[in-house]
Amino acid sequence: MNTRDITILGLISLLLLASGMAVARQLETPAQKAQFQAQWMQNNLAITEVQGKKIYSIILHFAQLDETPGADKKANSRAKDADIRAILTHDEYRIYHQHSREMLIQEAQEAKQATPQNAK
């Protein structure tokens, strides 16, 4: 196997891994989403246990709402954000908000990569 073949296999592996991560993210339950996000905040924002429990409940509530048919996910996201903002300090919220934006950009890029391009 030459260097070109190894490079191609490496790129294919990376693409499969990225698509697998996107699929896995779509299969998460509302409770798993809430746990993951609350854990991220505890690890990265040094929030208290009380804050963590409140945030978990908020995230779980809105994740469950988003699962219902016809859910207004944008409105739910804004409401969730407002509820979380009321619990976090200014600096904690700033870090959380920046991370949320980065994750949205990453998810949009992954979705774009997963969507086949229209042939011209």
Image (tube, helix red, strand yellow):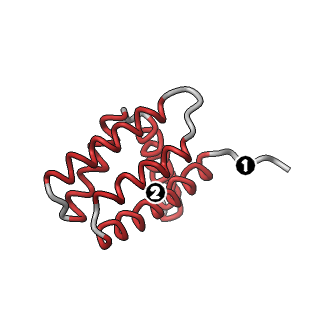
Query: x%, y% of residue 74?
Result: 56, 47
**Which residue in the rendered view is the most extreme toward the left?**
49
Which label is found at residue 10? Answer: 2
- Against 110, residue 90 (above or below) is below
Residue type for callout 2: Gly
**Which residue in the rendered view is the most extreme toward the bottom?**
91
Q: Say which residue appears at 47% left-offset and 44% top-offset.
A: 22
Residue type for callout 1: Gln
Give the image quarter of residue 58: top left
Q: Say which residue appears at 55% left-offset and 34% top-offset.
A: 71
Mark 1 or mark 2: which comes first in sequence? 2
Distance between the Cα atoms at labels 1 and 2?
22 Å
Along the line of sight, the residue nearer the viewer: 76 or 104: 76
Q: Say which residue appears at 54% left-offset and 42% top-offset.
A: 73
Name the element at disc 1: loop
How many numbered marks, from 0 up?
A: 2
Residue denoted by label 1: 117
- 110 relative to 89 in the view: left or right: right
